[in-house]
Image (cartoon, rainbow, N blue to C red):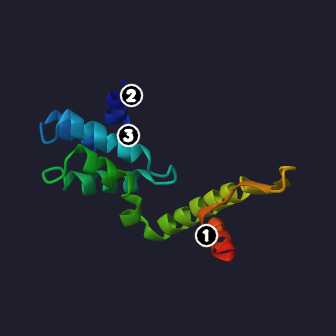
Amino acid sequence: LRLAQDLCDRFRLIGAALNDGSISLAQADAIVTGLRKLPARLTRAELTRCEEEILAHTDTLGPSELRVLAARLVEIIDPDASDADDAKRLAREEAAAHRGRFLRIAPDYHGSMRITGQLPVADAALLTAQLD
């Protein structure tokens, strides 16, 4: 039902291609799944351009490839904003990794120290190099 609603309301070109037999149901579902991942800031004209762009590749790409292409079309439509979105995403991921890191060193009271922790890969590589 959600696919049918999207084909009628948001992605009319994909719906028309499905109706005339240019694409299969699996391709339409994959394309719409990918297009749903595009940023909400895209205008109607930009979404139409995305649909046109992806329909040009339906003869050569399978459903899984079309899903990936559809989700990444913003890089073609608006590369500057796409770069900014990627930078924000990376900053959020880095902050989350930083918040979740810890390192504990405590005696085990048997003549040794117990070391436990969780570090982002880059920090762990630095620590490993220092320990080596």
Give the numbered dot on residue 10.
3
- Looking at the rendered structure, the secondary structure element under dot 3 is loop
Q: Position of residue 98 (x, y in %)?
A: 71, 59
71 vs 130: above or below: above
Which three-letter amino acid code belongs to the residue tagged 2? Arg
Label 1 to label 3: alpha-carbon separation: 46 Å
81 vs 130: above or below: above
Q: Position of residue 48 (x, y in %)?
A: 33, 52
N-terminal-most mark, 1 or 2: 2
Residue corresponding to mark 1: 125
Mark in front: 1 vs 3: 1
Residue corresponding to mark 2: 2
47 to the left or right of 59? right
Number of marks in the image? 3
In-front residue for pair 102/89: 102
- Looking at the rendered structure, the secondary structure element under dot 1 is helix
Question: Is the N terminus in the top left, top right, bottom left or bottom right quadrant?
Answer: top left
Q: Position of residue 50 (x, y in %)?
A: 33, 55
78 to the left or right of 20? right
Which image quadrant for residue 117?
bottom right
Label 2 to label 3: alpha-carbon separation: 11 Å
- Outermost residue toward the top? 1
N-terminal-most mark, 1 or 3: 3
